[in-house]
Image (cartoon, rainbow, N blue to C red):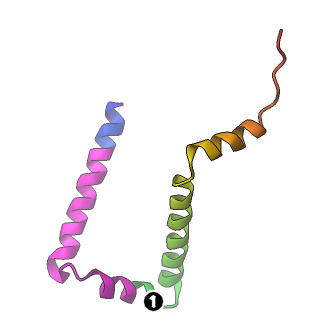
Amino acid sequence: MRLIRLLRVVGLVTIMLGARVTVSPQGLILAPVFFAVMAPIGWPGQFNLDLRCLVARSASWAWLPQRASAHRLSRHRRPTAVP
């Protein structure tokens, strides 16, 4: 458990330092910078498109209600014999 906490803290500090390095020269003008990076057609644009689709798909799975996923799992369980 301590290792997981340590990894979370290291990840958070890394993201915060990376954000600081990025925001320092450009400021917080997010929309123009975001769309300028996402727009080009080529390998970087393809990678960004794939990543956006993957993130959207993962987010949609995270928002599924617990009850619906539990119901789906219960349909696929094998019946157990009662002694």
15 sits to left or right of 77: left
- Residue 72 among magenta residues: no
> Please, which residue is most extreme toward the left here?
24
Quadrant location of the C terminus? Answer: top right
Q: Which residue is label 1 attached to?
A: 39
Q: Across the whole image, how many numbered discs are drawn on residues?
A: 1
Which residue appears at 78% of the width and 39% of the height? 76
Which residue appears at 56% of the width and 48% of the height? 65
The residue stretch that appears in magenta:
8-36
Q: Secondary structure at mark 1?
A: loop
Question: 81 above or below 56?
Answer: above
Q: Amino acid at mark 1?
A: Ala
Question: 77 above or below 54?
Answer: above
Which residue appears at 18% of the width and 68% of the height? 20
Q: Residues within 10 Å of mark 1 (few under 14, many from 20)?
A: few
55 sits to left or right of 6: right
Which residue appears at 26% of the width and 57% of the height? 14
- Residue 15 among magenta residues: yes
Question: Residue 67's x, y, as percent?
Answer: 61, 42
22 sits to left or right of 45: left
Quadrant location of the N terminus? Answer: top left
Q: Main secondary structure of the magenta part?
A: helix
Residue closer to the observer: 20 or 82: 82
Question: Residue 6's x, y, as percent?
Answer: 29, 40
26 sits to left or right of 51: left
* Residue 26 occupies quadrant: bottom left
